[in-house]
Image (spheres, helix red, strand yellow):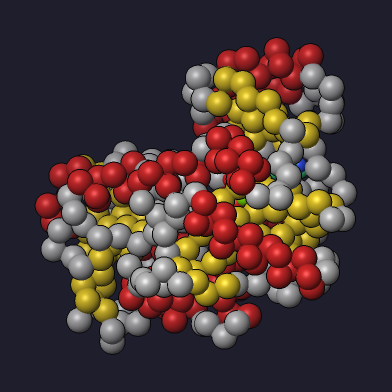
Amino acid sequence: MKKIIIICGGPSSEYDISLLSSQSIIDNIDYNKYSVSICIIGKDRKCTIKQISKPENISKWENGNILFTDTLLRLKEYDIALLGTHGQFGEDGVLQTYLEEAQIPYTGSDSYSSRLCMDKFRSSILVNSSTDLFIPKTDIVHLNNLEEFLNNVKLPVFIKPNKNGSSICSYVVKDLNNLKQILKDFYSHHKGEDEILIQEYIEKKTEVSCGCLEKKDHTFIQLPPIEIIPKTSKFFDYTAKYTKNASLERTPAIGIPKEQREIVSELAINIHKLLGCRLYSRSDFLVTGKKIYYLETNTLPGMTSTSLIPQEAKEIGIDYRDLISFFIDNS
Ligand SMILES: Nc1ncnc2c1ncn2[C@@H]1O[C@H](COP(=O)(O)OP(=O)(O)OP(=O)(O)O)[C@@H](O)[C@H]1O
Ligand SMILES: [Mg+2]
């Protein structure tokens, strides 16, 4: 029986989402096939490690007291670390570097690719120069200079951190009435030296996202794109992402023509290869007529049973439990 350790949490603004992804994995993983342990990294990087033989509610677990770096020897006991982490530390190449150094096999992209994809600005330049995809016109400033920049730029613009996820600190800025509130939000998640993107606001668009699955032999399972229609938000913001029924998410993505759906599926694989991703990834796009804008690639995208990749996989007959087994068996 393969010994699996699911790693989740960490010092990221996506801590809560990571626990949701991991809880879904814990609720659905095949306990007849794998021996399962969990490592929750607290926001203070202190860990709890526990073996389980059936689903348990991890939100009830007490905080741990061993620093993550001190758990590495113990993590070597496992055949594979299944990463349920998102964002800073867990998806940006830091955790991946620790695991590589300790020679602990893990699911998903390596440290280099993780780091590159977390940098939306530089990875999108690479994608733009190597494909027919468009990218929104983008300026990049340090958070300390954001206020001055916004005071002098032609509005509307779309602003978001260069390295974060879950639409945290993402705003359509049409006027500067809420500037104080916006800056307060940014400073609660970021330091003054962090990079912020100020982008052309793509307004009349169809939003689609598309993952791909890479087998151990480097052949691919193509996934269909999923279309996202936020019901009350102006874009796919935090509320639209994580509130039940706040968005309509549909596969097939009938808001774009069939030929374009095929193109997006192929692009998801080509971008995955270009950025050096491994096992799975999910790229986000905005479509306006024939133009397809590339937004970003997620190396550890949301993995609750109703997240986008699980929905795409379900559409081609791979249920959530099989998807988890796919990740383990192809790592
Ligand atoms: N330039 C833009 N114009 C219009 N909408 C945008 C633009 N950039 C981003 N968005 C909207 O904001 C959302 C979040 O942006 P993006 O995917 O780049 O960041 P993220 O927070 O890292 O997302 P994820 O949760 O997928 O990691 C997009 O899904 C889209 O709805
Ligand atoms: Mg995104």
The quarter of the picture where residue 173 lies is top right
Q: Quadrant of the C terminus?
A: bottom left
- Left or right: 174 in relation to 283: right
* Residue drawn at 65 percent across, 50 percent down: 131
Point out residue 222 in the picture as x, y percentages from the top left corner: 57, 72
Q: How many marks?
A: 0
Q: Position of residue 256 (x, y in %)?
A: 82, 66
Q: Give the residue at x 21% y 57%.
A: 104
- Does residue 148 sit above or below 118 in this rendering? above
The answer to which of 139 and 233 lies nearer the viewer is 139
Q: Quadrant of residue 154?
A: top right
Residue 103 position (above or below residue 66): below
Between 138 and 259, the one nearer to me in the picture: 259
Q: Quadrant of the N terminus?
A: bottom left
213 or 19: which is nearer to us? 213
Query: What residue is shown at x 24% (from left), y 50% (from top)?
Result: 100
Let me know if residue 51 appears in the view: no
Residue 106 rendering spot, x and y as whole percentages: 30, 60
Q: Where residue 177 sits: x, y (%)?
A: 81, 23
Q: Is residue 116 left or right of residue 196?
A: left
Residue sitting at 18 percent across and 54 percent down? 103
Considering only vertical position in the picture, is 142 above or below 63? above
Q: Is residue 218 visible?
A: yes
Q: Is residue 180 left or right of residue 34?
A: right
